[in-house]
Amino acid sequence: MRLAGAVVAETLQKLRAAAVPGISTRELDALAERSIREAGAIPSFKGYHGFPASICASVNDVVVHGIPDDVPLREGDLISIDCGAILAGWHGDSAITVAVGAVPDELAELSRVCEESMWAGIAAAKPGGRLTDISHAIEQAIRANTPASGGKYGIVQDYGGHGIGTEMHQDPHILNYGKPGQGPELLPGVCLAIEPMVTLGRPDTYTMPDDWTVKTTAGGYASHWEHSIAVTEDGPVVLTALPK
C-alpha cells in the first residue's frame, strides 16, 4: 500500500503543478492516467461503477466526484483533485485542493482549514482508540476556525472517509463529525482513508443529473483533502505522502 500510495502522491504532485489557468480538467485527467500507468499501476477510479475518468476534478462549488471536462480552469478557481491507484492489488487514495493562480484569501483559508482538519483526524488514529476519535478531531479542528466573512464553516455530512486495502472502499465509513470514543477499536494493521470536506457556508449538497457531480446547494465553495493511512503500534503512518 505504500507503493500504491507513492504512485498517487507523485501523480498529485504533477497535477498540482499543472493546475494553472487555461488547462482543462480533461487534460489533467490525461496527465493523471499517464502518470499512474507509467508507474505500472492502474487508475482506481476509471470504470469504478461506471465513472469515466482517472481523477475526480471538483471545481469551486463542486464538493466531490466532479467529472473532468473541456472547460479551462480560470484564475481564482479552487479545484479539489481526488486520485486513486491500484498496484499489485492494493489501493492508494488521496485528494488535494489547489488554488488556480491567485485566489481570494477566504478560499486559501478554506483549503488550509480543511487540510488542517485532515491532519488532526490522522493524528487521532491511535491504536486502542475508537473510530469516532478521528471524526471528533476533524470536527474540532474545523470548529476552531471562523470564516472572515462570518458564520461558520460547513462540514459535509453525506460523504466521509472509509476503510481501504484490496478494495478502494471498505468498511468502516468515517464521519467527519461526532462524539469521540465510539465505533470499532482502532487496531494495528487497520488502513483508512481520512477525507474531510469543508464548505464556505451551508454544507447541504445535491447530485447533478450525471449521477456523480456533487455540488453545494447554496453555491458556496468547497475544499476536500484526503490521505490513506495505516494504524500501527507506533501510531498512524501516512501511506499516500511523498517520502520527504
Image (cartoon, grey):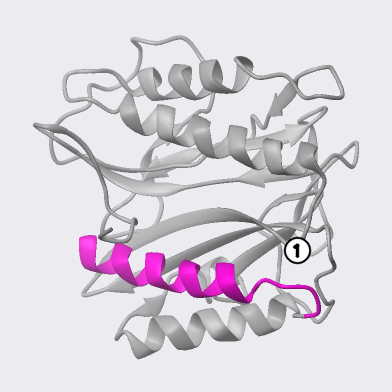
Residue 72 in the image: state x and y as whole percent.
83, 77
- Which residue is found at the position 77% from the left and 24% from the top? 147
Judge from the rendering whether residue 85 lies leftward or rightward of residue 118; answer left or right: left
* Outermost residue toward the left in this view: 233
240 on left or right of 199 = left
What amino acid does circle 1 point to? Gly
Residue at horizontal 59 percent and vertical 86 percent from the top: 30
Can residue 30 be found in the magenta stretch?
Answer: no
Dot 1 crowding, Cα within 10 Å, few <14, some 14–19, many 20+ = some
Name the residue: 29% across, 28% down.
125
Task: Decide which of 107, 126 is in the foreground and name it.
Answer: 107
Main secondary-structure element of the magenta-colored stretch: helix
Give 242 or 183, whichever is nearer the viewer: 242
Residue 68: % across, % down? 71, 73
162 to 49, vertically: above or below? above
Where residue 74 appears, as percent x and y from the top left, is: 85, 68
**Residue found 67% across the figure and 84% down from its top:** 27
Q: Is mark 1 on a helix, strand or loop?
A: loop
Compare residues 106 and 201 and report the one nearer the observer: 106
What's drawn in magenta, residue-wise? 2-22
- Kindly identify which residue carries mark 1: 101
Residue 99 against residue 202 in the figure, above or below: below
Q: In which quarter of the image is the C terminus?
A: bottom left
Q: Where is residue 206 in the image (x, y as percent from the top left)?
A: 81, 43
| Residue 136 sits above or below residue 244 on the image | above
User: In the image, is residue 228 above or below residue 120?
Assistant: below
Q: Quadrant of residue 37?
A: bottom left
Determine whether, in the image, residue 177 is placed left or right of residue 59. left
